[in-house]
Image: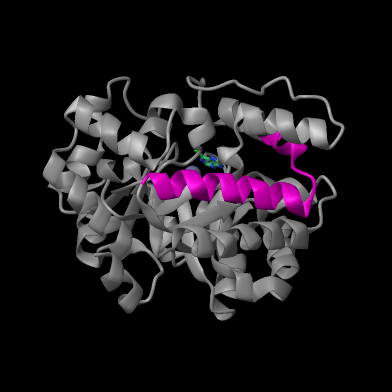
Amino acid sequence: MWPTAELHVHIEGTLDADLIRELADRNGLPVPAGAGRGAPFRDLQDFLDVYYANLDVLRTRRDFQDLGARYLARAAAAGVRHAEIFVDPQSHTERGVPVEDVLLGLSAALADARAAHGMSGGLIVCFLRHLGPDAAMATLEAVLPHRSLLLAVGLDSSEVGFPPSLFRDVFERAAAEGLRRVAHAGEEGGPDYVWEALDILGAERIDHGNRALEDVELVAHLRETRTPLTVCPLSNLALRTAGPDLADHPLAVMLDEGLRASVHSDDPAYFGGYLDDNVRALVAAGTVTEDQVGVLAANAVASSFLPDAGKAALL
Ligand code: ES4
Ligand code: ZN
């Protein structure tokens, strides 16, 4: 595999059935009914219901460190040299898990991966759109004491009905704290959600962005501004936001249009594969050529929040 950067992975989406069982056992909890359920899902919400139910087994700092360590070892094997990892603190604090246990456990895994695999990385705190802007602001306040552990803020969970504009103030506050900004948009929501993420939230990357292709002006804008799109093909098949044939995935059009798209894994425990599996599936389907695999890896590195010297070392 080409050396690359993972920019779109939800750490809770790496929680596979084996680790669910292990953590349930360790924490004296029942194994959630959805353990082991994978693709296909009816839609994003059908998946999210399983995802939130399963992550209930994550309780202690050690649980988060183990989750992070397992993901990072698998990512290293996929050629990932730098990982910017999404975490959903609200899904844990709502259940009484202290936010510092989430952030310090994952940060310990990142520090260990630097030593064990030579990987760099960081955390992106995502706000759950379905809980609304006030809860997002409270979450930002709760994580700011750990500001040094964070790279960026993001926006995820149920998209339609929760437009980016709702989160203007919290993103503005995050930017004032020096945090970078990304947002999920154009996964199920339309191009208007992508415009809002860019214009109102100041998002520097769009996570997914598939539906941006429905708006020619937006495509031109994304091309001119070199805005990264972090694309997750197996996720799109699993959630029926693209396909059913991977050969028809919009990534081919994105690359043809000169957009800065890269391939990532989203929720690999649920969608049938890690970053390398996504790339291999695209090549097997004929969606991208072997040469484009190198372009995708270079785009991922260029789209990361690494300083220029760090990017140059990976390119
Ligand atoms: C997610 Cl695939 C996807 N979309 C939006 N939010 C998410 N959280 C975890 N996976
Ligand atoms: Zn995602």
Instruction: Identify which residue, 51 or 108, lies in the foreground.
Output: 108
Task: Report the magenta residues as a range.
Answer: 52-78
Question: Could you say where residue 247 lies in the image, as x and y percent from the top left?
Answer: 21, 26
Q: Is residue 73 above or below residue 285?
A: below
Q: Residue at x 25, y 66 (%)?
A: 225
Res 193 visible: no
Q: Quadrant of the C terminus?
A: bottom left
Chief SS of the magenta region: helix
Residue 30 picture quarter: top right
Residue 306 picture quarter: bottom left
Q: Is residue 252 above or below residue 41?
A: below
Question: Could you say where residue 39 lies in the image, as x and y percent from the top left?
Answer: 49, 22
Instruction: Identify which residue, 260 or 7, lies in the foreground.
Output: 7
Q: Quadrant of the N terminus?
A: top left
Residue 133 appears left or right of 212: right
Question: Could you say where residue 220 lies in the image, as x and y percent from the top left?
Answer: 19, 56
Instruction: Identify which residue, 290 or 195, lies in the foreground.
Output: 290
Q: Residue at x 74, y 63 (%)?
A: 138
Q: Residue furthest front?
A: 116
Residue 215 appears left or right of 255: right
Q: Residue at x 76, y 63 (%)?
A: 100
